[in-house]
Amino acid sequence: MKDFARNFCLRGLMYAWGGPVIMAIVWMCLAANGTISELTVREVTLGIMSTTVMAFVAAGISVVYQMENLPRPFAALIQASVLYIDYLGIYLLNGWVPVSQIGMFSLIFVAIFGLIWACIYIPIRRKVKRMNRMMADQAE
């Protein structure tokens, strides 16, 4: 468990900068589109701090896949749950998702998480099967 916490923090610290950078890009696009014209100091501060935390947690939770005794589907469930709580909490805190839209947010989150997970998992599973076949052929 000590290694889990250490690796979680290391990964989180390595990628925490990504949240504010992505947020700045989104703000620039919204400003160019005329959706927002200016931000208050509170909005900027809250946005920077909260997206840093969001990116830290999102990067850190990927360490769950390093736990050897944890089945992959259960690790994915843990990751999805933590990311859902992380994203929804930050989005609600910043007012980016109204409470009335939590259901829609949830549907979109599940669909995108499943798609990304499948895009990563399926090619890896194919490569592992191919490598296992090659090793079995060499052993014969």
Image: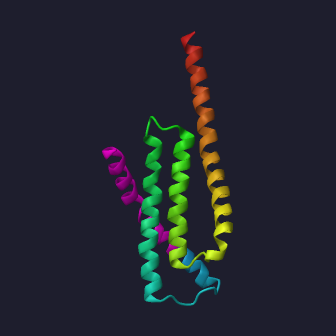
Quadrant assignment, res 133: top right
Q: Is residue 12 magenta?
A: yes
- Please tell me whether the stretch drawn in magenta is mainly helix, strand or loop: helix
Q: Which residue is most to the top?
A: 140
Q: Is residue 5 magenta?
A: yes
Up-down relation of residue 38 to residue 128 (above or below):
below
Residue ID at (52%, 62%): 85
Residue ID at (57%, 90%): 37
Residue ID at (52%, 51%): 79
Q: Position of residue 55 (x, y in %)?
A: 46, 63
The C terminus appears in which quarter of the rendering?
top right
Quadrant assignment, res 48: bottom left
Q: Position of residue 64 (x, y in %)?
A: 45, 46
Towards the viewer: 137 or 109: 109
Q: Position of residue 78 (x, y in %)?
A: 51, 50
Up-down relation of residue 17 to residue 138 (above or below):
below
Q: Position of residue 26 (x, y in %)?
A: 56, 75
The N terminus appears in which quarter of the rendering?
top left
Residue ID at (59%, 84%): 31
Q: Taking 59 as reference, is 97 left or right? A: right
Q: Tell me which segment is drawn in magenta.
A: 1-24
Up-down relation of residue 19 to residue 118 (above or below):
below
Q: Taking 106 as reference, is 8 left or right? A: left
Towards the viewer: 43 or 36: 43
